[in-house]
Amino acid sequence: MDPTSWLIFAAAVFIASYVQSVIGFAMGMIVMAIVGASDAVSLPELTAAVSIISFVNIVVALKGHLTVVHRRVLGWLILSQIPAIFLGLFLLTVLDRDAQAVLRFLLGLFIAGGSLSTMIRPAPRATVSGRLSCVAAGLSGGIIGGLFSASGPVIGWFLYRQPLPLLTIRATMLCFFGLGTFSRTVIVGFQGGLSSAVWWLSAIAFPLVVIGAWLGRIKPPPLPDLALKRAVFFLLFALGVFIMASAFFDGFRMRQ
């Protein structure tokens, strides 16, 4: 990686941690969007580093909240998530090797679609979802998590529809993400994907995450929460569309 790529990654992590500290989520999507739009880091290395960073953040955030997790929902989500992560990682490996333009287009589609889904408040259910719905959500989240290490939009949409206390929803979601990022990191490690570049990216990210989160708490932007969320997700949508367009034209040029 050249110095410019390192700087882009560092800036993306700092911005993402600052924004997450203010609005509560979206760190993974922001890092993937900024770095993916610049094509500064290969997607396999980027997603591996994001998994490590996210896992550490989740462990800290979960402290003291494990008792309020909805165990039945989480159990079915995790049971279906683990095999789906293997499938997502397999798709990442194959597409990165044989169809990088397709992989980047899917990344852009995920970011653009994810940004829209997070701005739409889902209608709450009357009862907690059953086994089949939990399994379907876990499979979807696992595939996206394996591909891009950012299954937030899928699982967030599913869990925020449940008629459960907000603290239970957040704790259950964090457990799902934590076990997913840990499993993904272990699988990638056994596959030999935790290269020195991944560990360097993670090492650079940790102090920036701490500084960004601290700054977000003591010096949030002078905007209402809703306005800030709209600005962030408009930017994410625009970056997603840009990634899709650049991937499309790259693929078109390769065929000529």
Image (cartoon, grey):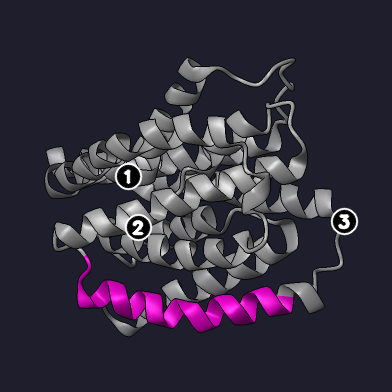
Residue bearing mark 3: 224
- Residues marked 1 and 3 touching at CB (< 8 Å): no
The earlier-in-sequence mark between 1 and 2 is 2
The earlier-in-sequence mark between 1 and 3 is 1
Task: Give the CA separation, mark 1 to mark 2.
Answer: 8 Å
Q: Amino acid at mark 2?
A: Thr
Q: Amino acid at mark 3?
A: Pro
Q: Is residue 45 left or right of residue 242?
A: left
Q: What residue is drawn where x is 70% and y is 26%?
A: 122
Quadrant of the snapshot with the C terminus: top left
Q: Is residue 203 magenta-colored?
A: yes
Q: Secondary structure at mark 2?
A: helix
Would you call the spot at circle 2 few (<14 residues within 10 Å), some (14-19), or many (20 or more)?
A: many
Quadrant of the snapshot with the N terminus: bottom left
Q: Secondary structure at mark 1?
A: helix
The quarter of the displayed image where residue 116 is located: top right
Residue bearing mark 1: 147
Q: Is residue 146 left or right of residue 242?
A: left
Task: Give the CA separation, mark 1 to mark 3.
Answer: 33 Å
Between 241 and 121, the one nearer to me in the picture? 121
Residue bearing mark 2: 47
Q: What residue is drawn where x is 86% and y is 67%?
A: 222
Q: Amino acid at mark 1?
A: Leu
Image location of residue 115, percent across then percent down: 59, 41
- Residues marked 1 and 2 touching at CB (< 8 Å): yes
Image location of residue 184, percent across then percent down: 31, 52
* 46 relative to 151, above or below: below
Q: Is residue 233 magenta-colored?
A: no
